[in-house]
Amino acid sequence: MLSKSMEKALNGQVNAEYYSAYLYLSMSSYFDSVGLPGCGNWMKMQFQEEWLHGSKIYDYIIERGGRVILQAIDQPPSSWDSARAVFTEVLQHEQKVTGLINALADLALDERDHATSIFLQWFISEQVEEEATAGGILDKMKLIGDDNAAMLAMDQDLATRVFTAPSK
Ligand code: FEO
């Protein structure tokens, strides 16, 4: 059984993950509106990943006998100055999410909630990957600068991303 404080904290993370999904869907829509559908596709896949993250925590709360209380999802921003500005925000957002996951892991340790500690290991590893991926794309966009041909090539590259649900 989850403690009330852990139940509340995990509910907060469900909301944070669904907000991430919403943010990336908004970024996908922005990219589609500026002629970068490959970047739009990448963000759409990211949206699906985040929705899965939220749902994974949702299922865990229930599995541990807790109660999920869904909260309002904040409205995400809808426009950015450039593709590079979008990926700068993605990296900053993922760094913030890493902080939230680490705080949850700290709480699990404080409460000696070993099951939640193990559950959160997957998210800790996932955040390493998320930050590395966003940082890698941002580095390439910095190199591309104002080179439109290079940006279009990168867009085609990002168009190939497909969503694969991780095994449990
Ligand atoms: Fe669910 Fe991108 O962190």
Image (cartoon, rainbow, N blue to C red):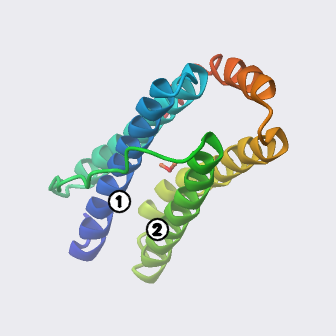
Residue 114 vs residue 62, the one in the foreground: 62
Q: Indicate the position of residue 141 as horizontal and vertical percent values.
A: 75, 41
Residue identified by numbered label 2: 100
Q: Indicate the position of residue 155 as horizontal and vertical percent values.
A: 67, 23
Q: Residues within 10 Å of mark 1 (few under 14, many from 20)?
A: many
Identify the mark at residue 13; answer none if there is no mark.
1
Residue at 23% across / 49% down in the picture? 62
Q: Are marks 1 and 2 in contact (CB under 8 Å)?
A: yes
SS type, badge 2:
helix
Q: Indicate the position of residue 59 as horizontal and vertical percent values.
A: 29, 43
Whether residue 164 is visible, yes or no, is no
Between the C-alphas of marks 1 and 2, the distance is: 8 Å
Whether residue 114 is visible, yes or no, is yes
> Is 47 drawn above or below residue 80 in the view shown?
above
Residue 138 appears left or right of 16: right
Residue at 15% across / 56% down in the picture? 67
Amino acid type at image mark 2: Leu
Q: Indicate the position of residue 140 as horizontal and vertical percent values.
A: 80, 41
Residue at 76% across / 20% down in the picture? 153
Which is more N-terminal, label 2 or label 1? 1
